[in-house]
Image: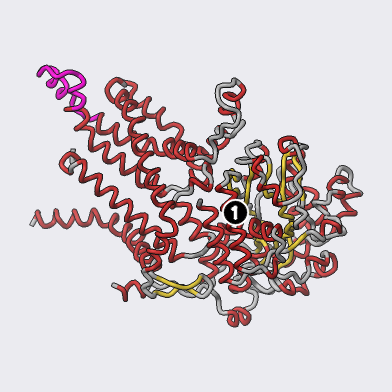
């Protein structure tokens, strides 16, 4: 009796989440899936005709942008991992009583809205702006060097904007690492390098995995950085989708591309999970 | 599964024109409130307030909720499309959008027909070129707010020579320092004019030719970026030396940097018009008419254009500005009151039907995506 009631309470607890996701995720997904198989025009209305060619045609037209986005997402994930790992390692292991202060400092820039921060980069990276202007005046870089409107700027913006999404899960994983395991390793004559690779890194893997997902998925679909810091040759799939919906009012193509993107991401994540091995990820 | 998917089809977005006419305006009374959506920096401002809005409220007792919410035609249309398609009122009684969007919204039945008996000042004071335009015959749905010219802006100090034609934006000497526009109509129309094509008779083949030229320009590394509004910052920061530009922006930029010039290309420039219009089922349509009529008084028109420096639809405002202390340069600027010689070089966008618009957009999209 009590067992039964407990189970009922459990269902009750997940009810708000399920209801929310149904209304704001499952239903819109179906609408979009339906739209992606429709034909027609904005003014005349779109009708469902099972027009699967929306997928093949839009993929053929925008494969460059899809591959570019996946590549950018990969670069961003690896770069944020390389940048944030030493940083949060230091905070978690050497931060002492000031850990929370350091974490706050890490997050401080992100109290400013995303768009404002990206616009700020636009000012900083201008051809004759604070950064390049001073370097050019000092003769340290060539006079015609430009960063804005290049893939360097777009990747820089993405890495900067998504850094906390990697850093925080990594920090959580490293923070709860049991230090007596490291003591045990050194008692057993492990070198510090061996201890890092055999103890610390495997135990940090759940954080790496969570951080990678949180970084890779949104960065592949991002369009703000490419829009503000990029140029024609750095267009990402997010920009294409945004333009299909907002400018061209071609909802079927936009929806089809969204699903292609989603499938691409799922495949990437699946391969990644397989490569890491699932038992490592449960922590 | 397929049946289920089919059941969530999207209804036709076009409102039934007949039922719209029968419905008419939601009221024939002045309600005392006007919700006005406009673009940033597009009305006179003094000491943090908008004198024209204050004058209007004093004259009519209508309170104005002024919202500088429109950043681009496309994205604004994206935000109001859904309720309009459902026949619901949007938050605004008066909106300002560009001519081609007026044509589209009119066609879709998203705009109220104007009652010209309430717009006497427009009939009396608007310049001839603003009446009965190709995008809105008979001014059925709209009357102009301000207009402007799409042409070329360049930094004379950095180019070392004058620019006179769109072909100058293809000069490899300035590789990586040239800006183009994400607004499909501006970029394509200027290019069509360069190729000697009459805009009203432009065909899809003409646009395909333009597309090839634009792709080549990107391949050659000449274009730094396709810009929206932010081209003005890039020009001011000297990230670019020349770009497609809107006249009104450049007048304001030259105040800070006298080396910046605006030119209507010899091949031809575009006269575009931003128009006031009333979205269908607006709550305060008569208040909106009152405002539209109010700003067509020459002294009010002069007050607005004296600050925003775009092109004023009321020719009489020129004389008033010329007699106002400090406004002589504005009154004499051919970018605010174009000379007859300039007017001969100005063209209007072709009014595109839906299929054409989609085809042109698709061709242009390929240029933007690299």
Task: Looking at the picture, tell me which residue is in the foreground, B25 or B357.
Answer: B357
Element at badge 1? helix
Image point 86% across, 57% down: which residue?
Answer: B341
Q: What is the count of numbered marks?
A: 1
Task: Looking at the picture, tell me which residue is in the foreground, B356 or A181.
Answer: B356
Image point 31% across, 39% down: which residue?
Answer: A211
Q: Is residue B7 above or below residue B80?
A: below
Instruction: Please state the horizontal and vertical placement of residue A97, each as a whole percent of the image.
Output: 31, 20
Q: Residue furthest toward the left?
A: A1
Can residue B256 be seen here? The reply is no
Crowdedness near tag 1: few (<14), some (14–19) or many (≥20) residues, C-alpha within 10 Å: many
Can residue A173 be seen here? The reply is yes
Q: Is residue A72 above or below residue A45?
A: above
Instruction: Please state the horizontal and vertical placement of residue A161, each as a whole percent of the image.
Output: 43, 38
Image point 39% across, 58% down: which residue?
Answer: A258
B176 within the magenta span: no
Q: Quadrant of the C terminus of chain A?
A: top left
| Helix, strand or loop: magenta stretch | helix
A180 within the magenta span: yes
Instruction: Please state the horizontal and vertical placement of residue B17, each as a whole percent of the image.
Output: 59, 79
What segment carries the magenta color?
A: A175-197
Q: Residue furthest toward the right?
A: B323
Task: Looking at the picture, tell me which residue is in the foreground, A193 or B219.
Answer: B219
In this picture, residue A115 sits left or right of residue A35: right
In this picture, residue A103 sits left or right of residue B267: left
| Figure colour scheme | secondary structure
In this picture, residue B64 sits left or right of residue B341: left
Q: Chain of mark 1?
A: B
Instruction: Please state the horizontal and vertical placement of residue A212, each as a whole percent of the image.
Output: 31, 40
Q: Tell me which corner region of the image, top left, top right, bottom left or bottom right, holds residue A189.
A: top left
Q: Which residue is mark 1?
A: B214
Q: Is residue B182 above or below residue B329?
A: below
């Amino acid at each position: 009796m009590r067992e039964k009631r407990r189970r009922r309470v459990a269902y009750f607890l997940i009810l708000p989440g399920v209801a929310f996701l149904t209304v704001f995720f499952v239903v819109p997904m179906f609408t979009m899936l339906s739209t992606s198989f429709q034909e027609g025009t904005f003014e005349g209305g779109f009708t469902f005709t099972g027009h699967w060619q929306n997928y093949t045609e839009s993929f053929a037209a925008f494969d460059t942008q899809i591959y570019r986005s996946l590549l950018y997402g990969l670069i961003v994930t690896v770069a944020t991992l390389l940048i944030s790992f030493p940083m949060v390692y230091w905070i978690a292991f050497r931060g002492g009583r000031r850990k929370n202060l350091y974490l706050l400092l890490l997050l401080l820039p992100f109290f400013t809205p995303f768009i404002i921060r990206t616009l700020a980069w636009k000012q900083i990276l201008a051809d004759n702006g604070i950064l390049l202007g001073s370097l050019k005046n000092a003769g340290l870089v060539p006079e015609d060097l430009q960063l804005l409107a290049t893939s360097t700027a777009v990747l820089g913006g993405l890495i900067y904007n998504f850094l906390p999404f990697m850093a925080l899960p990594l920090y959580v994983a490293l923070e709860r690492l049991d230090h007596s395991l490291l003591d045990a390793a050194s008692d057993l004559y492990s070198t510090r390098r061996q201890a890092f690779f055999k103890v610390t890194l495997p135990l940090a893997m759940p954080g790496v995995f969570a951080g990678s997902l949180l970084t890779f998925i949104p960065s592949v679909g991002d369009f703000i950085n490419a829009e503000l810091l990029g140029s024609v040759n750095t267009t990402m799939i997010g920009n294409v989708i945004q333009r299909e919906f907002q400018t061209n009012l071609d909802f079927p193509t936009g929806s089809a591309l969204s699903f292609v993107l989603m499938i691409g991401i799922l495949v990437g994540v699946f391969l990644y999970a397989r490569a890491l091995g699932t038992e490592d990820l449960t922590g | 599964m397929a049946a289920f998917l089919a059941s969530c089809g999207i209804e036709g977005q076009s409102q039934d024109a007949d039922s719209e006419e029968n419905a008419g305006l939601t009221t024939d009374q002045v309600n005392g409130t006007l919700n006005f959506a406009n673009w940033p920096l597009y009305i006179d401002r003094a000491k943090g307030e908008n004198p024209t809005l204050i004058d209007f409220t004093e004259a009519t007792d209508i309170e104005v909720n002024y919202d500088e919410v429109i950043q681009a035609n496309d994205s604004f249309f994206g935000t109001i499309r859904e309720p309009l398609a459902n026949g619901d009122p949007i938050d605004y009684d008066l909106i300002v959008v560009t001519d081609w969007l007026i044509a589209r919204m009119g066609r879709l039945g998203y705009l109220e027909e104007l009652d010209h008996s309430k717009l006497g000042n427009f009939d009396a004071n608007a310049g001839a070129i603003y009446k009965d335009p190709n995008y809105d015959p008979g001014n059925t749905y709209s009357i102009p707010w301000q207009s402007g010219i799409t042409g070329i802006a360049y930094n004379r100090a950095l180019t070392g020579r004058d620019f006179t034609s769109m072909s100058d934006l293809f000069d490899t000497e300035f590789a990586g320092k040239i800006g183009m526009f994400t607004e499909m109509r501006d970029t394509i129309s200027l290019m069509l004019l360069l190729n000697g094509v009459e805009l009203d008779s432009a065909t899809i083949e003409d646009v395909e030719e333009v597309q090839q030229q634009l792709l080549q320009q990107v391949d050659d590394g000449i274009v730094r970026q396709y810009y929206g509004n932010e081209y003005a910052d890039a020009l001011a920061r000297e990230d670019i030396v020349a770009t497609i530009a809107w006249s009104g922006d450049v007048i304001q930029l030259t105040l800070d940097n006298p080396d910046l010039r605006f030119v209507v290309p010899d091949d031809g420039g575009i006269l575009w018009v931003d128009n006031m219009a009333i979205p269908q089922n607006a709550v305060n349509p008569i208040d909106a008419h009152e405002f539209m009529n109010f700003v067509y008084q020459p002294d009010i028109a002069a007050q607005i254009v004296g600050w925003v420096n775009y092109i004023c639809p009321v020719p009489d405002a020129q004389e008033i500005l010329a007699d106002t202390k400090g406004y002589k340069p504005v009154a004499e600027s051919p970018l605010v009151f174009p000379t007859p010689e300039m007017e001969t070089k100005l063209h209007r966008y072709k009014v595109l039907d839906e299929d054409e618009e989609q085809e042109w957009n698709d061709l242009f999209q390929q240029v933007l995506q690299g």
